[in-house]
Image (cartoon, rainbow, N blue to C red):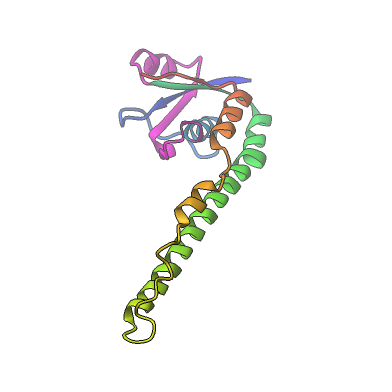
Amino acid sequence: MTKYLVFKNNGELAAPNPPGSAEDFACEIARVVERQGTPREWFMSFPADSSEATFYTIKGELRYSIELDEEKIETWENEFEPLLQKIHDVDDAVDNAYCEISQAINDLQDRIDQTSTGCSDLELVDDMDIEYGFQAISRPNEQKFTTHISEYFSIQAYRP
């Protein structure tokens, strides 16, 4: 098991970690745990016992330590990443449903507003409250998911 230190890449760090490397996976895992939508390129990782890790730790750029081996990397790729995608799929489905319903309501109101005789005084959507319905819809608990990731990969967070 190797411990990797993950740093915020403020543009002063070396070239990005090679795609598919353990360091690259450490950056991706840190990005997910941070839950800020930060691009992977904004992170850089080095083995904890490297001179680069020591240098950037002294500079105060350390954000996370993550323990990885081949088995954990495979688990990330085969279990955690697909599960994260499904979490995002649920969020997207809820968001899309909200948008579609809102649009349908707007279209209905527009049609009522365009009529000049028999239906112009109808109030069909005034009492509709879709906000309440969508607030009541539970979404997957991403905080629990990232906490589980942190435990599985023995992640320690460091804030500058």
Q: In the depicted view, which residue is nearer to us: 4 or 104?
A: 104
Residue at 49%, 30% (x, y): give it: 30
Q: Quadrant of the N terminus?
A: top right
Counting from the top left corner in percent of width and height, residue 46 is at 47, 23
Q: Quadrant of the C terminus?
A: top left
Identify the image quadrant of residue 118.
Answer: bottom left
Q: Is residue 39 magenta?
A: yes
Furthest-right residue in this view: 71
Instruction: Please give the range of residues in magenta.
Output: 32-61
Q: In the depicted view, which residue is nearer to us: 20 or 9?
A: 9
Residue at 41%, 25% (x, y): give it: 7
Identify the image quadrant of residue 9.
Answer: top left
Counting from the top left corner in percent of width and height, residue 80 is at 62, 38
Note whether 57 is above or below 115 in the view shown.
above
Residue at 42%, 36% (x, y): give it: 36
Furthest-bottom residue in this view: 117
Residue at 50%, 31% (x, y): give it: 33
Note whether 39 is above or below 124 in the view shown.
above
Q: Is residue 93 magenta?
A: no
Identify the image quadrant of residue 77.
Answer: top right
Counting from the top left corner in percent of width and height, residue 78 is at 67, 41
In the rendered structure, the answer to whether residue 116 lies left or right of residue 1 reads: left
Say how many tags the image has. 0
Counting from the top left corner in percent of width and height, residue 13 is at 35, 28
Note whether 25 is above or below 125 in the view shown.
above
Q: In the depicted view, which residue is nearer to us: 128 or 79?
A: 128
